[in-house]
Amino acid sequence: MSIAGPKHDLREIVNAILYVARTGIPWRYLPHDSPTPTTVYDYFARWEADGTAERVHDALRAEVRRTKGRRVCPTAAVIDSQTVKASPAAPADTVGYDAGKHTKGRKRHIATDTLGLLLVCLATAGSVQDSAGGRQVLTTLGTRHPTVVKAWADGGYNAEVVHPAARLGIDLEIIARDPAVKGFAGLPQRWVVERSFGWFVQRRRLVRAYEAPPERSRAMFHWAMTDTMARRITRVHHRPRQNLQPNPDRSP
């Protein structure tokens, strides 16, 4: 009895998923030399459902932290949210109006470590308040990353989040924006999470909430960050060119 290998080249499946994340194209528009769109999406959905995508992401995060001289398990986190417009295909009950951002769509609630690497991601309707989403993020953070004892958030979060965080053993510090400062200004300890959102929207698939089920939006976040971390780990640092001098001992 012969044991057949995988029917599809899994590296090509991963490449196709990352291609969708980077370019933002619909699945059905994958290049003709990729596996079929149905096959790629089936793997994307399966790896989200069985946790494969998240496990790969978490393994890369641990490696990046090691290369930066950090402990694998973080002790501090930063939380924030971002509202983006949703695809017309998104179910109505997963979309809402964010009055603060004047945007109808979905809200992404995330927690990152102090390097800006993703720890927790949650997708909700845009109408969900930051504090409500923040409580869910902190609950998940406390469960999956029990080593985290310190966190920072902006003024959009309030005591409704601080007290639940304390019960989880997390000291949540609210960093308020100085009202005298006009325009954009990075807040201490919080700029890393803003940078993370910047990384995400470099992937065109994340400019809007294109995935219909919210859990697939979460999976796309994991793939986007997996791509970012893999590139960081494998980055080749080219040495600067030196002014070459002729070697007098070498024959012409």
Image (spheres, rainbow, N blue to C red):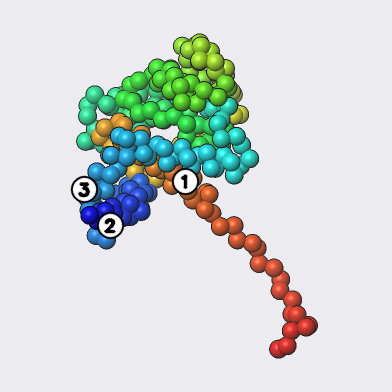
Element at label 2 = loop
Task: Please state which amino acid type lies under the numbered disc 3.
Answer: Thr
Res. 245 image quadrant: bottom right
Task: Please state which amino acid type lies under the numbered disc 2.
Answer: Ser
The N terminus is located in which quarter? bottom left
Specify the label residue 228 is tagged with: 1
Residue 181 or residue 13, whichever sits in front:
13
CA separation in Å, label 1 and label 2: 21 Å
Which residue in the structure is indicated by mark 3?
Answer: 38
Is 64 drawn above or below residue 176 in the view shown? below
CA separation in Å, label 1 and label 3: 25 Å
Which residue in the structure is indicated by mark 2?
Answer: 34
Query: Residue farthest to the right?
Result: 248
Task: Please state which amino acid type lies under the numbered disc 1.
Answer: Thr
Name which residue lies at 36% across and 53% down: 11
Is 219 drawn above or below residue 4 in the view shown? above
Name which residue lies at 32% across and 35% down: 50
Res. 211 image quadrant: top left
